[in-house]
């Protein structure tokens, strides 16, 4: 495989890794989040794109205790996930749910989009949300010390300017938080799902992604997820910048 570089990662640290040739290990991917993870076809579009890659065909297994109900153009796709509508990140962290879910469905890679419910329902401080993120990362690593973790700067909210400012404040803080949590054995990637996302067009109710928004979520997660999968399989060389 050609060397792969993730340039969209916003961590201020530098981590260079050279790994042996890619194996045929099946990589277990857990999509973690709230209704934004549960609803829509973004997981399906990523799965189908991976299936179309001759090097990755049939090598990725989505895991989780939930099952998608979307039709997604009658496509056959892996429907497992851990998207829980209405579940705040802070509550999820405090109750140790991620540790429970990973015990039932072990994973190698987790994608995380969380914080929207907390902001919609109240006015959590950014520091509270970041503490919850840290707790969740600890739970992931408690189940798999080599967990590869992809954290989203979350999509905008169209409910009010005040709510969207809370989203912006959280997103601004995520890269530095991720750098503080990053390790060589369990790297964290940050993906920007906010920039270029139009709340008037890409949301259908001020919270959840429309068809255009779903495609933007898939496009935003895909490069980092692809690199994480290849890293697990031992076939990537990359830098985290």
Image (spheres, helix red, strand yellow):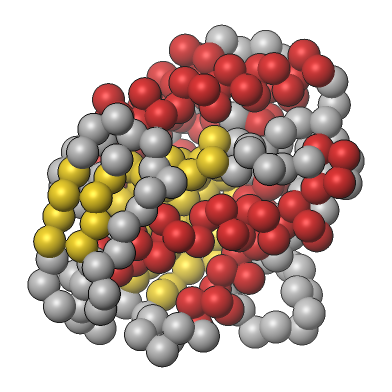
Q: Residue at x 73, y 23 (%)?
A: 164
**Quadrant position of residue 46:** bottom right
- Residue 12's spot in the image, x, y percent? 29, 30
Q: Is residue 37 left or right of residue 231?
A: right
Q: Residue at x 41, y 56 (%)?
A: 224
**Residue 139 seen in render:** no
**Quadrant position of residue 190:** top left
Q: Is residue 231 above or below residue 93?
A: below
Q: Is residue 160 above or below residue 196?
A: above
**Quadrant occupied by the C terminus:** top left
**Residue 171 seen in render:** yes
Q: Residue at x 82, y 53 (%)?
A: 210
- Residue 201's spot in the image, x, y percent? 86, 46
Seen from the viewer's position, the closer of residues 164 and 80 is 164
Q: Is residue 3 left or right of residue 171?
A: left
Q: Is residue 57 above or below residue 121?
A: below
**Quadrant occupied by the N terminus:** bottom left
The residue positioned farthest toward the bottom in the image shown: 54
- Residue 154's spot in the image, x, y percent? 60, 36
Q: Residue at x 65, y 62 (%)?
A: 42
Seen from the viewer's position, the closer of residues 27 and 175 is 175
Q: Is residue 182 left or right of residue 120?
A: left
How many marks the image carries: the answer is: 0
Q: Is residue 145 above or below residue 14?
A: below
Seen from the viewer's position, the closer of residues 89 and 130 is 130
- Residue 6's spot in the image, x, y percent? 36, 53
């Amino acid at each position: 495989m050609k060397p792969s570089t993730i340039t969209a990662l916003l961590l201020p640290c530098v981590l260079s890794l050279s790994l042996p040739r890619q194996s045929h290990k099946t990589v277990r991917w857990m999509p973690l989040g709230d209704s934004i993870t549960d609803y829509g076809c973004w997981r399906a579009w990523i799965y189908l794109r991976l299936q179309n890659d001759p090097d990755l065909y049939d090598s990725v297994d989505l895991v989780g205790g939930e099952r998608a109900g979307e039709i997604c153009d009658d496509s056959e796709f892996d429907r497992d996930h851990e998207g829980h509508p209405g579940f705040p990140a802070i509550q999820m962290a405090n109750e140790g749910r991620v540790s429970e879910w990973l015990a039932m469905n072990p994973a190698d890679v987790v994608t995380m989009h969380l914080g929207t419910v907390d902001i919609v329902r109240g006015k959590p401080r950014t520091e509270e949300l970041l503490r919850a993120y840290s707790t969740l990362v600890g739970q992931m690593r408690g189940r798999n010390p080599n967990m590869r973790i992809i954290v989203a700067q979350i999509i905008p909210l169209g409910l009010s300017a005040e709510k969207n400012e809370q989203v912006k404040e959280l997103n601004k803080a995520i890269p530095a938080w991720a750098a503080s949590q990053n390790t060589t054995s369990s790297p964290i990637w940050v993906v920007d799902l906010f920039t270029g996302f139009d709340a008037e067009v890409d949301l259908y109710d001020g919270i959840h992604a429309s068809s255009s928004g779903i495609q933007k979520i898939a496009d935003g997660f895909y490069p980092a997820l692809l690199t994480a999968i290849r890293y697990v399989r031992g076939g990537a060389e990359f830098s985290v910048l």
